[in-house]
Image (tube, rainbow, N blue to C red):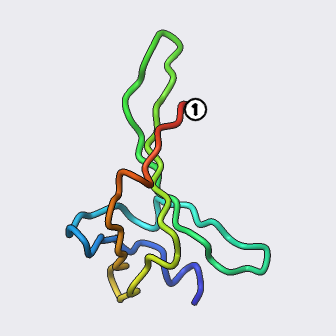
Amino acid sequence: MLLSDLAGKEIINIYDGAKLGLVGDADLAISPTGGIEAIVLTSRGGFAGFLGERDRDILVIPWQAVKKVGSEVIIVDLHNKSERMRKYSI
């Protein structure tokens, strides 16, 4: 599978039917051997504080959670999305 095959596909969680994002807006964690380890989705929050710091929610989807790559969507099985979501200030 090529990276271009994943671009633009919507990521859907089969557990609750939630739309998680687009692969085009995501990063991929790649192993040293060239395999995909995870899809990393980043959601931007609002501005906080005087210096304009931005909070980001990061959702890491292990490649093992990917159940099906279709022509328009990628189906994943994440039972507890909140366990994989963390806030980072950048």
Q: Find residue 20 and report its horizontal and vertical position in percent.
A: 33, 61
Task: Name the quadrant containing residue 8.
Answer: bottom left
Q: Looking at the picture, does residue 65 appear above or below residue 2?
A: above
Q: Find residue 64 and report its horizontal and vertical position in percent.
A: 50, 79
Q: Answer with left or right where residue 76 lies relative to residue 61.
A: left
For the point 32% across and 66% down, the residue is 79
The three-letter amino acid code for the residue at tag 1 is Ile
In the image, 2 versus 75, the foreground residue is 75
Q: Find residue 68 and report its horizontal and vertical position in percent.
A: 38, 87
In the rendered image, which quarter contains the C terminus? top right
Task: Name the quadrant containing residue 70.
Answer: bottom left
Q: Answer with left or right where residue 27 lies relative to residue 11.
A: right
For the point 50% across and 59% down, the residue is 60
Q: Looking at the picture, does residue 13 appear above or below residue 47?
A: below
Q: Looking at the picture, does residue 49 appear above or below residue 86?
A: above
For the point 51% across and 23% down, the residue is 53
Q: Answer with left or right where residue 38 lies relative to residue 33.
A: left
Q: Answer with left or right where residue 87 lies relative to residue 29.
A: left
In the rendered image, which quarter contains the N terminus? bottom right
In the image, 31 versus 24, the foreground residue is 31
Q: Looking at the picture, does residue 23 appear above or below residue 89?
A: below
For the point 43% across and 49% down, the residue is 85
* Residue neighbourhood size for the residue with mark 1, other residues' Cα within 10 Å, grouped as few (<14), some (14–19), many (≥20): few
Outermost residue to the right: 32
For label 1, the residue is: 90
